[in-house]
Every structure is written in C-alpha cells, then in structure tokens.
Amino acid sequence: MAKETKEEKTAEKSFTISPFRNEDAEGIVDLFHTVYGEHYPIRLFYDSQAIVQANEEGRYYSIVARTMDDRVIGVEHLYRSAPGPYIYEAGVGLVDGGYRNLGVNMKLLGYLYDTFIPERKNIEEVFGEAVCNHLFMQKTVEKYRHVETAIEVSLMPAAAYDKEKSATGRVATLGVFRCYQPKPHRIYLPAPYEREIRTLYGRLDDTRDIAVSAAKVPGDRRSRAELSIFDFAQVARIAVPEVGADFGEFFSGIEKEAISRKALVIQVWVDLTQPWVGEAVKELRMMGYFFGGALPRWFDGDGFLMQKLLCPPYFESIQLFSNFSKELLEVVKKDWKRTGA
C-alpha cells in the first residue's frame, strides 16, 4: 500500500465553517454521541428532526464545521435561554476528538462572534457559560471581547463529562457577556453588594445609570416568577421579573416545589430595574442564597444572580484563567460562607 502523502493528510483534516443546513442534523447527533455518549442533558441534540425544527424556528442557530466530504466534525450554537428578547446564549459547542488542536473551535467562535451575530439586528447582547473544569474556553474570553460577570457554582453534574473523564464533582461555570447594541438604562443595586456589582459594571463597555435600591415595595404589588427544572442536572432556575409585597411567602412556595423535584442547585434571577429589588435580595439572603453576579440585559433590563446549594460547592475543583475571575470567585466563596452552609 502506498504511503499517504503530506498533502493527502492535510486534505483529510481540511474543513469549512458555515450556518446550519438540514442535512447536518444527523451529523450533529452523531457528534454528541461521540463526545458525550448518552449523558448530555439537553436531549434535543439526540433528535435530528428536533434540531432541524429548532433551527427553522430560530430557537437555535447552529454553526457547523464540516470536512470536505460534508462530515460534521464541530458545532457551536446560539440560542435563547434568558427571559429578555434580545439576549442570546452562545454555547453547546463541541469538536470531534480527531480534529482537536487544529483550530476548529476557534474558527467556529470567530465566525459566530465576528460574522454571524453582527449581521442579525435581533441580537443585542450575547453571553456564554464557560465551564470551569478546564481553562480552554476561558482563554477565548478576552479575544472575543467578553467580560466576566458571574460564577454559577456546581451547575453541571460530573456525569455530563463521564465520556471524557474531565470532572470529579459538579462543575461550575463562568458567566461572560458581550454587548453588540448598547441600551443604557437605570439599575438599582442591592446595598449589601453595591461595591461588588459596581466593580463588575466598571468593566462593561455598555453604560448604566446606577443607583442603590432603597425603596420599599408598594403594598399593592404582587410577585411573579417562573420556575424551570432541569432534571438531569438537578438544577432549578427561578426568574423573578416582578417583586411584590408578598415576596417572602411567595418565593418560599416556589423553593419548596424546586426541592420537592430533587433540585440540588437553585438559581434566582431578580430584575435590577426595580427600585425595590433590594427587598427581594434581603429575603433571599435570609433564606441562604449567596452572590452569583450581574446579568446584563437579562430581562431586557439587567438582572442579578443569587444561588443556593443543597450539595457541596466543589470550590477546590474550580479552574479559572483570568485574575479578575479569581477575584470574583473569592467574592462568591465569602458570601457562601456567610450563609453558614
């Protein structure tokens, strides 16, 4: 058998990047099986027809890396996961093991951030959740002009990484944001975290009119929230767009439901555009919730993350790249200790 030439080897590793085509769906499913086995928590990616439908409806935008013979060897996604209409999450990215260290992921991200998103006026803010069981994705934060604003402790179960054996406990994520279309607006900072949040906002390239939350909740206002449970991850996320005078009792009921549904991690998003948001944060602190970070454009206006754990924090396993993210982790750890957890 003739020895393979250098040119032939290079051709085997050649690839192109472009938006999703319907015929990519089966290849994306195969890629998830290859990298994650059966354990990826978003089940959509094991159903080719669901992937096609999600792209047709605009719930997901898939950016695909293909070989010259159209085999899918990498993918990155953009999708709606926050309450706000103009903010999208970039994530669910993976590359076939045989094509790593060839720049596939960097080219996917470059196309996504510098070509695909700027062409879409419906996308004003983009965020990502960089896993903290390795540093690879965190090293791209500065390159693609993201700012670190939050740390989600123990977010992902270790089982999600069984295939690659890259986690020994639950995995934290680092929340990073990039503004594409500025929207200056007023936000109100909860007094216990004023200094920490001002530090975060001092690093953004999108301006805010910042005040401290000192108002009392109007007596006729009622709380409103939406609970989402992610069964595989055992995570509950509670979006609170409206804080009312009934917040303490109202939220206790939602928390009980989350715990009854086996949630080990409870995240709460509160809206910083409400002058009385400090009242909600005060209640949450008394209930054992601790600092998570700022969420620019989360409700269209900005949000604030607080979190509660019914499992270990696995702080010792968190790997962080930038000095600022390490400082942010110290803020999180200090406030977690305050809860007496």
Image: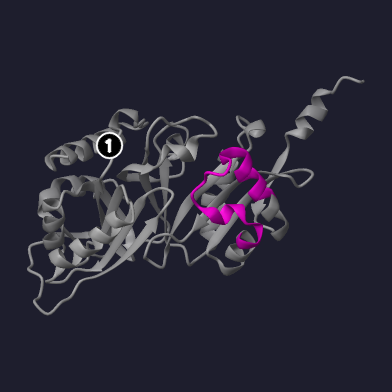
Residue 3 lies, with reference to residue 86, above or below; the image says: above
* Quarter occupied by residue 171: top left
Helix, strand or loop: magenta stretch: helix
Position of residue 27 relative to residue 97, above or below, is below
Kindly identify which residue carries mark 1. 312
Residue 220, quarter of the rendered image? bottom left
Q: Is 323 above or below relative to 271?
A: above
| Quadrant of the frame with the N terminus | top right
Q: Nearer the viewer, residue 171 or 202?
A: 171
Residue 246 lies left or right of residue 88; in this view the side is left
Compare residues 334 and 65 and report the one nearer the observer. Answer: 334
- State the quadrant of the C terminus: top left
Say which residue appears at 62% left-offset and 56% top-offset: 47
In the image, what residue occupies the spot 32% across and 51% down?
263
Question: Which residue corresponds to the image point at 10% horizontal and 70% vertical from the top-left?
Answer: 217
Q: Is residue 184 visible?
A: no
Which residue, as the protein is rendered here, is positioned at the far right? Answer: 1
Front residue of 142/196: it is 196
Residue 317 among magenta residues = no
Q: Position of residue 209 (x, y in %)?
A: 20, 61
Residue at the (91%, 20%) spot, across then down: 2
Amino acid at pointer 1? Pro
Give x and y (percent) for residue 164.
53, 31
- Percent across and percent down for residue 128 are 42, 48
Whether 41 is among the magenta residues is: yes
Instruction: Report the number of numbered marks.
Output: 1
Numbered range of the magenta stretch: 27-50
- SS of the residue at dot 1? loop
